[in-house]
Amino acid sequence: MQTFRPRRSVLYVPGANQRALDKARELDADGLIFDLEDSAAPGAKQRAREQVRRALLAGNFGTRELVVRINGLDTPWGEADLAAVAQLAIDAVLLPKVDAPSQLAAVTARLKVAGAPPELMLWAMIETPRGVLAVGAIAATPRLRCLVVGAEDLAAALRVPPSNLRDGLGAALERTVLAARAHGLDVLDGVHTNLNDDDGLRAQCAQGRALGFDGKTLIHPGQIAAANQAFTPDPEAVARARAIVAAGARAERRGDGVTVLDGRLVERLHVTEARRILALAAAARTEPDTRRS
């Protein structure tokens, strides 16, 4: 079974900002996305690429999941980005503005030519109307591990006014989560861009968790704590999950497929979800042991 990886808080780190790259080693984020796309102006693309490459070669990022967001292959920078990171010690390459599975297939082909290891995964940003409409087919792409919502780009494309609770984006968010779950992927919510609106950030985190997201992408270190708190199971949920796993184990020893706990039916699907909750709690250091999912 695959080792569980929490993705409660995943921070975009601007590749053109050396100070941010250095500071990222000290942050309590579950994952880091080294950004070569939106945060790097055209004149800073090469510098961002070189700085990210040097930072990753230097290492010391601990157990954080490491992802590089490249520029699209239809831009002047995408090919060079991919060649620069293909053999680095990263977990995934994030492709922006994915509208169709063919874009991910093109990245996969180029990674093979560049000598990337087979365990290097792909992440895909869903941030265009076409991407939302095709998200089911996109999610079925081999080598894909995670979908990432680009809520700002999507809202602009849909002409949806800004709102903390993303009025007008509900259908797109739900469709993306549905596609991820149908194909066994994780899915991350989009960023909250108002750095002075802590209440809005917490509201979006709560909304994202209620919709089924695994975590939230972030643009500032000051947002990490709110995301970690929102997507970490509370003590009551952990206690309930532990009881469900124990009840399931007792039923299995009896040869039963189902059991009853506190008047509620417990099936294998409930045990599977309870184990995921315990794994997340363990990864968040609220549990002393390490579990797998």
Image: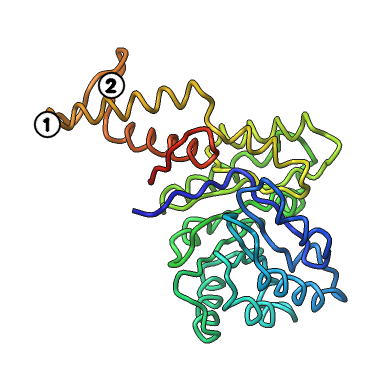
Residue in the picture at 56% in, 61% down: 123
Chain-order first, disc 2 or disc 1? 1
Mark 2 → mark 1, Cα distance in angstroms: 16 Å
- What is the x, y in percent for residue 62? 60, 56
- What is the x, y in percent for residue 50? 76, 77
Residue holding disc 1: 255
Instruction: Look at the numbered disc 1 and give the secondary structure of its residue.
Output: loop
Residue in the picture at 63% in, 31% down: 206
Residue holding disc 2: 265
Instruction: Look at the numbered disc 2 and give the secondary structure of its residue.
Output: strand
Q: Amino acid at mark 1?
A: Gly
Horizontal relation, residue 6 to residue 44: left or right: left
- What is the x, y in percent for residue 99? 60, 64
- The outermost residue toward the bottom is 113
Circle 2 crowding by C-alpha within 10 Å: few under 14, some 14–19, many from 20? few
- What is the x, y in percent for residue 247? 26, 25
**Rendered image quadrant of residue 164:** top right
Q: Nearer the viewer, mark 2 or mark 1?
A: 1
Q: Nearer the viewer, residue 201 or 11?
A: 11
Disc sitting over residue 23 in the figure: none
Vertical placement of residue 187 versus 279, above or below: below
**Rendered image quadrant of residue 126:** bottom right
